[in-house]
Amino acid sequence: MIKKIILGVALASISNTYAQQGTASPYSYYGFGEKHFKGANEVKSMGSLAVFRDSLHINTLNPASYSKLQTTTFSLGASYKGTNLTNAGGSEKTTNGSFDYLALAFPAGKVNFAVGIMPYSFMGYNIQNTNKSGDFTEARQYVGEGGLNRTFLGLSYKINENFSIGVDGAYIFGDTETSLTKFMIDNGEGLPVERGSRMTNKNNYSGLTVNTGLNFEQPLNNKLTLFASATFSPEMKLKNDQEKRIATGKVDSNIGFAEIDGVTTRTDNEEMLLPMNYSIGAGVGNHLKWFVGAEYTATQTSKYNSFYKYDNANFNDYMKIGVGGFYTPKFDSFTSYFQRMTYRAGFNYEDTGLVINKEAIKGYNANVGLGFPVGRYNSNINLGFEYGQKGNTNMGLIKENYYAINIGLSFNDVWFKRRKFE
């Protein structure tokens, strides 16, 4: 029965990946959009660390972690996010939901395999600015939507009881569409003047990327283990087929645009950068009871400056520092369900690398989570709560305060083990 449930959920989730609007951030205007966290929601609740690996959950941040899995594991996640956008002129609230990931992993001796799909980035903004001049106001509306997806196939090799290595090969693909509409507003009537212009860019991206990882564990005594990990993704390129259209048309009171005439140009096989990324982390704990760790992640986003040209923005390198962990009072308790639950918490701080009007866009988020054991083979439901902030209101910028509810399902079962009958 569980296999039929997994197949149905998988098909529904994959179809949803191509049509969701996963962000309302104005900062998704830059680059490929707002990059989506590629780990499981139970990992996000621990500060988004790739350090810890266990036998119950798929850690998609580090392919070396697959070697720890002892049963076939199916993992699925989704989230709901609310955001309050604030600048000097006021504030606005938005909400959106997203499919976060779907992954399947299974053990095969010393080599374990994993396959999955998840969003890579989201683009979703609708920004209007104005410049008053005499009897008229010049208005510009910027709209963007779409995003990229990541489907991967990975393997992990267990060198010995302490050391594992792994690699993911991923295919990145997706479409984005951006537009800039220019028009005039009559200050006396407060309505758009009839004529306006629109420039639209449609981008189709595709390409391969690689993520490598290692995990190390060293028992320090009977109750304490040292954990360490590292990941590395080399610089890669995506192919971009772009269609650009410049048109004139009529603008109505709702800023609807009815095209009159226009010109379309195409550029195929343009190369776009996926910058080098790495992480390194360490922690201590007891496999079955508790863990606490920290991790540093960096991405060479400064190289975006050779590919993206903005009047008021540029890129420095991205960095993130995360700390977190979990606590399970007694995983095999027969008398208390609450003692078998897992309690998680984490915090991370990031510098996105994006600089607008000479202001660095930085942020933080804090997470707590609960793991609910269900069924056989220690399957579980993981619920997480997140609060964060990004950006500020200096130099005409926008500050984002957001909350999120994240849910992850991790089903464990024995699929490939031969049964013996007497």
Image (spheres, grey):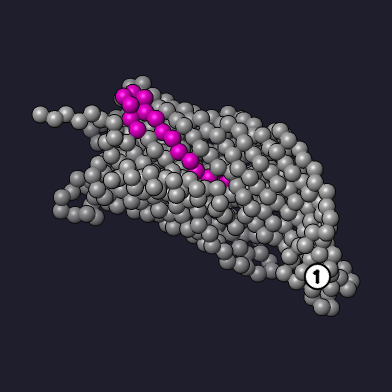
Badge 1 crowding class, 10 Å Cα cut-off, few under 14, some 14 to 19, many 20 or more, is many
**116 in the magenta segment:** yes
Instruction: Work out whether residue 136 can be spotted.
Output: yes
Q: Is residue 374 above or below residue 296?
A: below
Query: Residue furthest toward the bottom?
Result: 188
Label 1 sits on a secondary structure element that is: strand
The x, y position of residue 344, in whole percent, is 36, 50
Number of disc labels: 1
Residue drawn at (83%, 48%) of the image? 263
Query: Which quadrant is home to the N terminus?
Result: top left
Q: Which residue is mark 1?
A: 192
The x, y position of residue 142, in whole percent, is 72, 57
Q: Is residue 280 left or right of residue 200?
A: left
The x, y position of residue 120, in whole percent, is 55, 43
Residue drawn at (24%, 55%) of the image? 338
Instruction: Work out whether residue 35 can be spotted.
Output: no
**What span is colored magenta in the figure?**
106-121
**Residue 3 figure quarter:** top left
| Magenta residues, dominant SS class | strand
Query: Residue furthest toward the left?
Result: 422
Query: Which quadrant is home to the C terminus?
Result: top left
**Residue 63 figure quarter:** top left
Q: Is residue 132 left or right of residue 122?
A: right
The x, y position of residue 281, in whole percent, is 45, 35
Mark 1 is on which residue type?
Pro
Residue drawn at (84%, 69%) of the image? 193
Q: Is residue 108 above or below residue 267?
A: above
